[in-house]
Image (cartoon, rainbow, N blue to C red):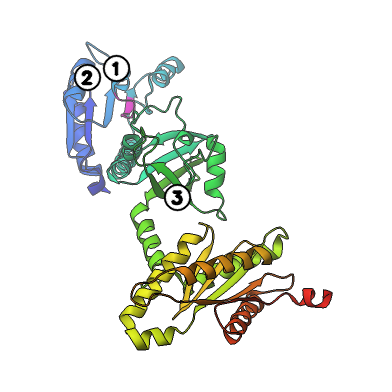
Amino acid sequence: MKNLLKNINLLYVEDDKEIAEEMICILKMEIGIDHIFHATNGQEGLKLFRENDIGLIVADIMTPVMNGLEMSKKIKEIDPSVSIIIVSAFSEVSYLQKAIEVGVDNYILKPINIKSFLNIVEKSALNLQQKRQIKEYALLSEMLMNTTSNLIFAISDNRVIFKNRSLSNKLDIDEKSNDNFSLCDYILNIDGSRKFKKEKEMLSYFLDKKSEQVIYMRKDIKNPRSALDIYDVNVMYIETSDKYLVVFTDITRIYNEKERYKLESFTDRLTNVKNKHYFKHIFHKMIDNAKFDNRYKLSLIMLDIDHFKKINDTYGHQTGDKVLKSMAQLVRKMLREDDIFVRWGGEEFTILCNFDINAAIGLAERLREHIQLHKFETIDRLTCSFGVATFCKNDDKSTLFDRADKALYRAKNSGRNRVEYIECASEKKDD
């Protein structure tokens, strides 16, 4: 216990020097407070308080020049957190009332019961230590929040009551002022539109664990055309004060790296179009859309370069690779941005498009004719065979893919350089 109180500075205000020396000695011996200042009156005590870091005061109520209550009042005006114990021979309610009005923490009557006195001083000293620790923790927390690059703010009663330095600097606003401030003005959707209207809506979104905990903010807040930074969101509820602490962590670099790796994993390195992995990733989503929305059209076109093995055997694999790249570029230019063009493997490609069967067959015919008329480097001309199938009511990814594959097989077995399609089972019955 004594070790905890060693760093406390105590001011003892007593005009009787003998009593003061005796009590100071007892405090040092029994409680372990080493740093004790002595003043013989309130004015001297006030001066010592201003010159030293004093946290605990024991003062006689009746001292010359300035009494203990007047001194206490002035000290409390300077620092309300200081603990003050008044010692008095007066038991009248009026004196106690004045002490309460001043903000005195304890009131001890003379003659002093040493045991009770020591108990009160010890409790006051420990309380002071706790206050200091809380203050230190608060300062440490503030320092940590202001030195981190994370954007941190606190919400209470659906309004922002605190924002750290990083957030203030990001938004170019005063760190201490929260008047007329709405964070919703700065939080955006991926398309740059405003995401929330009010803080209440924003907090509800952050607390909804089902939603994607990601938000967007301009890299340069003042520039409406500036690129968007991406932030991960974490929310902590502070139960003791009924507040929410929200932390935005900039994940722009990580997100971009992740997207880059994903793009690389979904891209065919030779032709720079999507690969089989991407096809499998997107195909089941498009099938689901077609199943749940009758208005959603989906067709699959498969194409294969005719006699490609002969090209490799005659001109070599390097020429074959050039042909594949040229052919992929040729087809890509004829497709819409929403069409999914994939190199399935070798000389075989697939196209996923939101067309009905007639439109899909029309697209396949235009591609076939365009490829046939195109002059390729080294080999001059080549042709492709096409198989087409469109989504039917009872289809899944396997049945749709199987029909397109069979249609391609039929095109190749029927002389190549042609478009074939296999209709739905329901269409066959209708025929």
Q: Position of residue 368 (x, y in %)?
A: 53, 70
Side (left or right) of 83 relative to 210? left
Read off the residue under disc 3.
233
Depth check, mark 1 against mark 3: the one in front is 3
Question: Circle 3 — which element?
Answer: strand
Residue 383 shown in magenta: no
- Report whether residue 393 is seen: yes
The vertical placement of 169 against 249, above or below, is above
Looking at the image, do the residues carrying marks 2 and 1 touch, with CB atoms under 8 Å apart? Answer: yes
Q: Quadrant of residue 19?
A: top left
Q: Which residue: 34% across, 46% down?
A: 150
Secondary structure state at the residue bearing disc 2:
helix
Quarter holding the C terminus is bottom right
| Three-letter amino acid code at the position of disc 1 | Lys
Marks 3 and 2, Cα distance to the nearest angstrom? 50 Å
Tell me which residue sits at (46%, 60%) in the image: 333
Q: Front-most of 264 and 404?
A: 404
Residue 84 lies within the magenta run: yes
Observer-side mark, 3 or 2, equals 3
The residue depicted at 38 percent of the width and 27 percent of the height is 177
Looking at the picture, how far across and down is residue 273, in whole percent? 43, 67
User: Within 10 Å of the Cα at label 3, are there few (<14), some (14-19), or many (20+) other Cα atoms?
Assistant: some
Q: Give the magenta part as a residue range.
A: 79-86
Closer-to-camera residue (196/202): 196
Picture disc at residue 74: 1
Q: Is residue 157 above or below residue 210?
A: above
Q: Amino acid at mark 3?
A: Val
Percent of width and height locating residue 70: 30, 14
Against 413, is 40 above or below?
Answer: above
Q: Is residue 122 visible?
A: no
Residue underneath mark 2:
46
